[in-house]
Amino acid sequence: MKHTIKILAIALAVVPAFMFSGCIQGKYDKPEVNEVPVGDTVTITKLWEIYDSLVAAGGGTYKFTKDCSVFGYITMSDKIGNIYKSAYLQGGPDDDKAINLHLLSSGGIYEGDYVRVNLKGLVLGDYSGMIQLDSVHVDNNIVKLKTRCFLEPELVDIENIGTGSYVGKLVKFRKVQFQEQYVGTTYADKEGLKTVNTYIEDEYGNTMIVRTSGYANFAGDTIPAGSGSLVAIVGLYNTEYQLYLRNTDEVQLTGRRFGDVDVIFENNFDATPVGDFADDGWQNEARQGTAKWKCQEATEGKILSISGNNAEENETWLITPEITLQANSYLSFKTRMMTSGNTLTAMISTDNTNWTPLPANIAASSDWAISGDISLAQYLGNIRIAFKFESPIGVAGKYFLDDVKVFTK
């Protein structure tokens, strides 16, 4: 028994000494540091110049064989699933271009990263028209210098995109909405994991594709009905520009749809009998000459018309019934002119006696002209709108009028 206790005591004395000795003398493996050389530096703009020279020469690619670096901000990564094994790199204020990075594997870089990309071994070219750097290895080619460096999107209109100046860039549209047929549907087919093209439009009817992958984490979200702002990356597929959303927080479509207004007063004359115009409350006064406004049939429905007379001078006033304005009221109407020499002026009065001309767009040809939304914000209470037609002797021209509306937005 004493012999056993002695052996145990020796063992207990040796173990701590062994453990302590092992901590002191042990050698640990150090992680291998991957140094990514810098070499010469170029801008993304320079990469575009090289690419443009390739296009001018009939296409092809350019492979970088020496260490060379380009700096930029990651404006979109594949984290949210709307793009795959891909990212968009954009220059700063002194480098006004962007480019797609085609990655060898997904992940590793994120929106807001400020990075240096070593170009050695990378191939500059395009995929169906979209300029890109191919075969980018996140660990071997990219050095992350800063994080959470978020670029502000550049303000644009849809009609500007066709210039080609915004390819790959982060942009913001201020006044757009999704076309009516897409409202209430989803951005993509989440269940079938299918990519879907939808369209946005501006108030002038210009449209653009919004392309969303079925793998995007917002693919099953409902497309909003309103108008407002939208932030996206501009892509290019062959000759067609398209937008890639980063997230739905950047889809701020909460305003009224274009043309969605509260009507205070309206007359499109479709219920007016054909002949001399005499709708209730309207005044149709020939103050000089005999010309008066008449209602007639047209391909677009019933419209009003008035013609000058070669033999006399005409001044005819068409005056609306009394209209009670609300805050932020507007006036709109349509006109056509068949022969020059006559004049038509839109006017407003608060007492049916003193009249002020309004800054309306009046037709100068046989094409229908929209007056524009004419602000009446400086007027309150009851008003009347007049259309003053003037025709000198020797002129027999004609004006058409339709869709008179007073409304609030």
Image: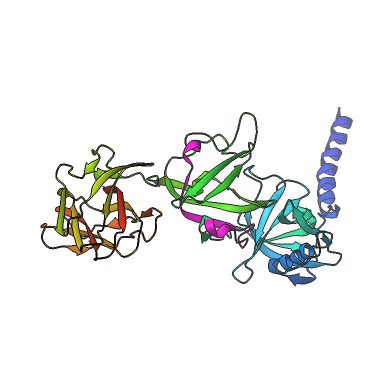
Inspect this view and state whether residue 217 appears.
Answer: yes
Residue 30: x and y in percent read: 82, 55
Residue visible at 46% across and 40% down in the picture: 224
- So how many labels did they put on this image? 0
Is 175 within the magenta? yes
Residue 351 image point, x, y percent = 10, 57
Q: Residue furthest front?
A: 311
Q: Position of residue 389 (x, y in %)?
A: 23, 59
Along the line of sight, which residue is nearer the eye, 136 or 354? Answer: 354
289 lies above or below 258? below
Q: Nearer the viewer, residue 206 or 88?
A: 206
Name which residue lies at 72% across and 69% down. 46
**Residue range (magenta):** 159-185
In the figure, is residue 342 to the left or right of 276?
Answer: right
- Return the x and y of residue 138 as percentages of the image width and height: 75, 53
Q: Residue at x 65, y 34 (%)?
A: 194
Tell me: 293 left or right of 127: left
Of residue 230 and residue 112, the one placed in the foreground of this image is 230
